[in-house]
Image (tube, grey):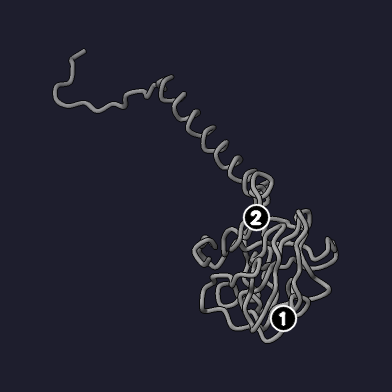
């Protein structure tokens, strides 16, 4: 039989390289684990809620969704200026309230001439906050207990907050967590609006 001269085309059998198979498997398993851990972290650390009302405008508007960090206050205490999420008086049937911390445990709070005084001194705040028309229960000095916080909405004249008798000072065990991110198409760190 004569051998054909010229070019011959044939397909080489592809062999699976064990190292390549192992690399693909490791990348796939790594991706699955990373996605799983991301979901676990977000759902165990975070929680989502919506803003009700206009008390936190202009930073947070009614209907806007926020992500809450539920772990941070297990490791540290709320600080002045933090935007917290809480249930008023621990009422499980109430919607979550979102307000800014202005008074810390042990401090004396009073609202005079529309401004907040802490331990007798005017609280240095952003001048964008309106002068409060109603001091509510803070017209007289209030001394916070060791586990209480005084909170106000950023839209001071349209906020039901610690000035209201039915809310009052917020106990630490009624705080759900710290408002962490705004969900508005893109996630924005709420710390940027403090």
- Tell me if mark 1 has few (under 14), some (14-19) or many (20+) residues whose alpha carbon lies within 10 angstroms of its own: many
Left or right of 120 in this view: 188? left
Residue, disc 2: 78
Q: Position of residue 26 (x, y in %)?
A: 49, 28
Mark 2 residue crowding within 10 angstroms, few (<14) / some (14–19) / many (20+): many
Residue occupying the point 51% across, 67% down: 193
The image position of residue 24, as x and y in percent, is 46, 30
Residue sitting at the far top: 1
> Element at badge 2?
loop
- As rendered, which of 104 and 107 lies closer to the eye? 107
Residue drawn at 61 percent across, 41 percent down: 36
Q: Quadrant of residue 159?
A: bottom right
Location of residue 151 in the rendering, given as x and y in whole percent from the top left corner = 69, 68
Name the residue furthest bottom.
133
Q: Determine whether, in the image, residue 34 is placed left or right of residue 23.
A: right
Quadrant showing the N terminus: top left
User: SS at mark 1?
Assistant: loop
102 relative to 170 in the view: left or right: left
Q: Residue at x 74, y 72 (%)?
A: 141
- In the image, is residue 177 above or below residue 186? above
* Residue annotated with mark 1: 135
In this view, the residue in front, 124 or 76, is 124
């Amino acid at each position: 039989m004569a051998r054909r001269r010229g070019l011959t085309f044939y397909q080489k059998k592809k062999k699976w390289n064990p190292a390549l198979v192992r690399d693909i498997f490791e990348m796939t398993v790594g991706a699955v684990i990373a996605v799983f851990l991301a979901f676990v972290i977000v759902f165990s650390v975070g929680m989502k809620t919506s803003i009700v009302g206009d008390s936190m405008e202009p930073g947070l508007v009614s209907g806007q969704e926020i992500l809450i960090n539920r772990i941070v206050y297990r490791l540290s205490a709320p600080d002045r200026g933090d935007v917290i999420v809480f249930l008023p008086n621990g009422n499980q049937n109430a919607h979550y309230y979102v307000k800014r911390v202005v008074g810390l445990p042990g401090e004396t709070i009073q609202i005079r001439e529309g401004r907040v005084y802490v331990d007798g001194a005017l609280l240095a705040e952003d001048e964008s906050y309106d002068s409060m028309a109603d001091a509510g229960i803070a017209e007289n000095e209030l001394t916070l207990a060791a586990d209480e916080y005084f909170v106000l909405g950023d839209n001071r004249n349209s906020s039901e907050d610690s000035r209201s008798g039915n809310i009052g000072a917020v106990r630490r065990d009624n705080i759900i967590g710290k408002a962490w991110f705004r969900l508005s198409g893109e996630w924005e760190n709420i710390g940027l609006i403090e």
